[in-house]
Amino acid sequence: MTFDVVPLTPTPDQYRYVFGGAPEPLVRVRPGTVVELTTEDCFGGRVTSTDDLPSRVCDFSKLNPVTGPIHVEGAEPGDTLAVHLVEIAPARDWAVSTTFPHFGALTATHSTAMLHDPLEEVVWVYEVDRERGTCLFRPRRGGPEVELPLDPMHGTVGVAPAGGEAFATITPGAHGGNMDTPELRAGTTAYFGVNVPGAQLAIGDGHCRQGEGEVCGTAVEAAMRTVVVVDLVKGAGTPWPRLETDDFLMSTGSARPLEDAYRVSQHDLVTWAAELTGWDTLDAYQLVSQAGLAPAGNVVDTNYTMVAKLAKAYLGREGVVAADGVHDRLRQTAAAYLAQR
């Protein structure tokens, strides 16, 4: 099997903080290309110790940097961009997490006004053991340390939005963006509807691990070395970002309030299942109601993200092929890349 391999390591001034806005792409690739890229953590690498409070060391207009855009040749509006996550690995032996005074699910925010005092701004530094595959939680105020398994993922993956709009990288939507779902780990193929020529893919916000919902507002935030394969499904759009693994199909929805994000993701999964199987919509609705899962992506960002998840086994694993079988094809490319590296 032959494929192009393209490295992409941005300089500090090349990171982007917006999806859209027509920036010059950092690289142009053909469908089927393997891209080896690096990403910085959501704080731009500025938070390195428990004394580095983000409010003091960060420029809040430059949080959540992404690597890109990556222009995919031949991508046109109405197509679907497929992004297979081959490998995600922490680039450093440390990672960080924080609480913010006005950010997170369990505190007052700018849109949830409360009279109680804001939460204290606190930083936790995690020791990352890449060989053992762990990260170490050290309580700041006493108590036992906890060793957690690494489960690397990217909180932010997306393309340029439609209609000439530009969204801050912290905001998830129909273009993808800061969805913060742990399902965006190695082995997953993500599908995005193409809105502009070249799609303009960007990736960032690496997490060593994250609980569903990202309840305090930050995960175990880390710089990453990541490998992806990109491909196109011509003439077939995707209304919301969709995910596929060997065993599951998933739809995402990003909106406020949370129940609307839930409805968007469930609606997309129901209609997708009906399309793939030929079932009536109400039959698909019934099956998803009895067999579906609903993991939270985030309940803290400017939009919330919910995921609707259904095992392929319930659709006839061998008989259902999503997106022209691109997931299986990209899995083969990933295996060939890893074998010859």
Image (tube, rainbow, N blue to C red):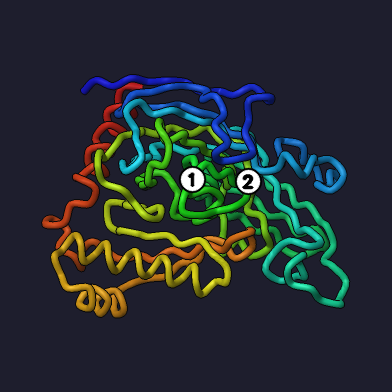
User: Residue 316, relative to residue 45: is it above or below?
Assistant: below
Q: Is residue 67 above or below residue 186?
A: above
Question: Furthest residue to the front?
Answer: 163
In terms of image quadrants, where is residue 284? bottom left
**Relative horizontal placement of residue 118, taking residue 292 as reference (left or right):** right
Looking at the rendered image, the quarter that the N terminus falls into is top left
Give 139 or 108, whichever is nearer the viewer: 108
Q: Is residue 48 left or right of residue 247?
A: right
Mark 1 highlights which residue?
163
Toward the left, the furthest residue is 319
Query: Residue at point 63% right, 30% down?
Result: 15
N-terminal-most mark, 1 or 2: 1
Q: Residue at x 34, y 64 (%)?
A: 268
Q: Residue 246 appears at what percent x and percent y?
A: 27, 51
- Residue at image point 22% right, 38% down: 329
Q: Position of residue 96 (x, y in %)?
A: 70, 47
Tag 2 residue: 168
Image coordinates for residue 202, horizontal then vertical, percent: 51, 36
Amino acid marked by disc 1 = Gly
Mark 1 burial class by Cα count in 10 Å: few <14, some 14-19, many 20+: few
Q: Quadrant of the C terminus?
A: top left
**Disc 2 residue type?**
Ala
Q: Is residue 66 visible?
A: yes
**Helix, strand, or loop for circle 2?**
strand
Label 1: which secondary element: loop
Category of crowding for the residue at label 2, using alpha-carbon neighbours closer than 10 angstroms: few (below 14), some (14–19), many (at least 20): some
The image quadrant that residue 333 belongs to is: top left
Q: Vertical placement of 324 versus 305: above or below?
A: above
- Left or right for 188, reference 69: left
